[in-house]
Image (cartoon, coloured by chain):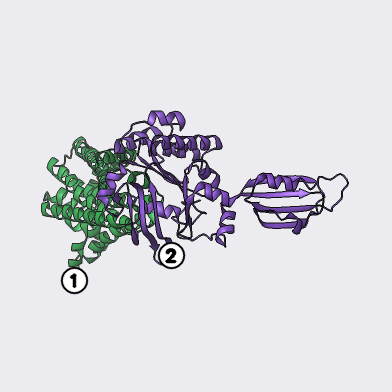
Chain colours: A green, B purple
Amino acid sequence: MREIVRYETERRLPAAIAVSAGLSAFAGLFFAIGPSIVDEVDLAAYAEAFPPAFQSAFGIDAIGSLEGLFATELYQFGWILLLGLYFAYSAGALVAGNVEHGRLDLLLASPVSRTSVLLGKFLSLLAPMLLVNVVVGSVVYVGSALVDEPFAFADVAMAHLLSVPYLLVCAGLGLFVSVLVSSGSLAQRGGIGLVFGLFMVESVVTDTDFEWLGALSPTRYYDPTEILVEGTYDLAGGVILLEAAILLVIASALRFQRRDI
Amino acid sequence: MSAIRTEGLSKYYGETRGIDDLTFAVDDGEVFGFLGPNGAGKTTAIRTLLGFQSPTAGTAEVLGADVTDERELIEARRDVGYLPAEPVFDEDTTGERALDYYGALRGDERSDHLLDLFDPPLDRKIGGYSRGNKQMLAIVVAFMHDPALLVMDEPTSGLDPLKQERFLEFLVDERDRGKTVFFSSHVLSEVQKVCERVGIIRNGRLVELEDVETLLARSGKIVRVRTADRVTVEEFSLSGVHDLSVDADRTGVGRSDGDRAGTVLSFAFTGEYNALLAQLNRYDVVDVEIEEAPLEEVFLRFYGDPASPTDAEHEGSDA
């Protein structure tokens, strides 16, 4: 399996570097304009202009400080939504499309088990996940010091560390769709749709009688705003996400074991 | 011992038949051709043997391993080389990296030797490969671990004639080294060159299992003759002539006098060539074509209807 992880990771690196660079640039942009936005714009009034569901979806109510601005723009949008969708999409491509185009034939004709193929491919997502967190996390921490509004190191570190279980769940959802359906494009769109749908569920049910439904959404267990603005870490949420990710991978492996390719 | 053995092996996709009730065995050290028209179920059979698909009924063993038992099959695969009909590699990697990768997974005992015979441009990305280069890379990958059993699906497709020839020679060498070879084909002539025994599959069912010699004797040649004189069906009675058709030649081509009294004869021939030539000698022959009977015609002659393709074949595989 080590060979499979190594090979697949190698192939992912160019895209991982591009994503890290893109999100770093996005973070840099907010260091350039962020301090003046926070000083000059009445963000509290800006936040109140949005409907409540929208405020909670993007954590807009916390936007009044530089930490809040980052939590809202970079983390709620860049991490929870963009990266979540990115990993769901990437994981969605792991099985269905490959089976559809016969790309697994040579691999599975080798003396390897299906489980090791699936796990190897899934684990290759870890490297880009870690890379983008380390790179952008460093940019955010160093950048905040450079603009003289240093963020707490522990908060930045935890915002990134706790995002890993969240992103693993997104990837797990993509993987699960990928082993279930036979069309590659359907799997990738399905993974994205599922993650986006769950994101919306949590946003829509907030402050309604259906708030319990939000427990199904991975976004409930990872809140970067809480981490960066209030300095509280939902460690239990991280554990729940990790368990969910493991369950999704196990379910996917069991399904993949039985499927025709 | 049998390298491959199947017993009532069937694979249905819902109501659609892929293969049905295949029972055959390939002995150790044998070169076995799995022959059938496109869409007959050859690829389905091979994918089931490799454990890519689970059979809906029946059993199969490859090198003694039950194909539905993953653990047994993984062990067996160490000694199986598989060449798919349309090999698909990751396009963003180079041939070199692909060789490293598969070498690490299955062992590399002789890629250097294979690369002398088949030489894809290893330093280039596979996305830029021609069909023939991909096929050559797949050949090296399939046999780099020096497997005891070679399973191939239409192995010469995509190779230019020179490389096809080289590949068939390679198979003969492999056989001489004691390897077992199992390959599917819809081209009788290549099967004839290397195989000892063939199974013929049609509409997912095994319709014949026999020696190549016997099959060839039965399939014969397709002969077309143009004569300057009139020939009737009655006078062209010769043993070994099948499906004789006699038409008046309306073209007049090849005759200086422009006379259009000639005849076009066409038939399948399985008899003695001397007898055929003696018979033809009695006419003023303008043109003769003798060619290998295409497999489709063999089917037509021996099994009634031309095999109609089922749509059960794995996508894009038997093309």
Q: Is residue B112 visible?
A: yes
Q: Chain of mark 2?
A: B
Task: Find residue A57 and report its image quarter.
Answer: bottom left
Which residue is depicted at the point 81% across and 49% down?
A: B228
Relative depth, front residue between B159 and A35: B159
Residue A12 place in picture, x, y as percent: 32, 41
Which residue is depicted at the point 79% across and 48% down?
A: B283
Relative to B258, B66 lies left or right: left
- Number of numbered markers: 2
Circle 2 is placed at which residue position? B16
Instruction: Kindly identify the amino acid type of the residue bearing the numbered disc 2.
Output: Thr
Disc 2 versus disc 1: nearer the observer: 2
User: What distance separates the C-alpha of mark 2 from that of mark 1?
Assistant: 49 Å
Q: Is residue A176 visible?
A: no
Name above or below for residue B241 compared with residue A106: below
Relative depth, front residue between B135 and B39: B39
Relative to A16, A140 lies left or right: left
Which residue is depicted at the point 20% across and 47% down?
A: A164
Name above or below for residue A185 compared with residue B96: below
Indicate which disc residue A209 carries: 1
Residue A173 place in picture, x, y as percent: 26, 56
Q: Chain of mark 1?
A: A
